[in-house]
Image: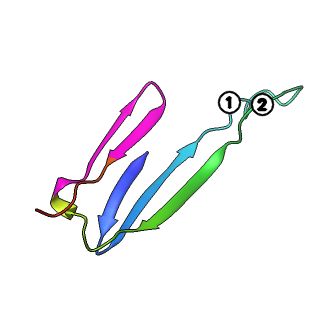
């Protein structure tokens, strides 16, 4: 997972591999696989220097702080 800030855009992207890529006999998957990307426009009130991200147990948490 990659979290990137450029100007006023926050982009979260990554790729989830296909767990069945090697064995193509039978499969059932609850979630999709492949590349993903999502971009959010940041308010001017957000302090870009204080953006924090943490990934724990499969959950990504992004914290945004207002400008002082």
Q: Mark 2 points at which residue?
A: 29
Disc 1: CA contacts within 10 A as few (<14), some (14-19) or many (>=20): few
| Residue contact at pointers 2 and 1, CB within 8 angstroms | yes
Indicate left or right for 49 with 17 as reference.
left
Residue drawn 52% across the image and 60% down it: 38
3 above or below 5? above
Residue 59 is covered by the magenta coloring: yes
Q: Name which residue lies at 45% across and 24% down.
A: 57
Residue sitting nearer the eye, 7 or 16: 7
What quarter of the picture does the C terminus occupy? bottom left
Residue 11 x, y percent position in the rendering = 42, 61
Q: Is the magenta stretch mostly helix, strand or loop?
A: strand
Locate the N terminus and report the quarter of the image it occupies: top left
**What residue is rendered at 39% in x and 50% in y?**
2
Q: Is 64 displayed left or right of 19 in the figure? A: left
Snapshot quadrant of residue 10: bottom left
Residue span colored magenta: 50-62
Report the disc number at residue 19. 1
Residue occupying image coordinates x 59% and y 41% = 16
Q: Distance between the residues labelled 2 and 1?
A: 9 Å
Residue 63: x %, y % from top left = 30, 47
Q: Residues within 10 Å of mark 2 (few under 14, many from 20)?
A: few
């Amino acid at each position: 997972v990659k979290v990137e800030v450029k100007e006023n855009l926050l982009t979260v992207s990554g790729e989830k591999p296909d767990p069945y890529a090697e064995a193509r006999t039978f499969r059932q998957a609850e979630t999709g696989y492949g590349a993903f990307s999502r971009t959010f426009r940041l308010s001017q009130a957000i302090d870009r220097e204080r953006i924090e991200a943490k990934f724990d147990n499969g959950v990504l948490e992004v914290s945004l702080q207002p400008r002082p």
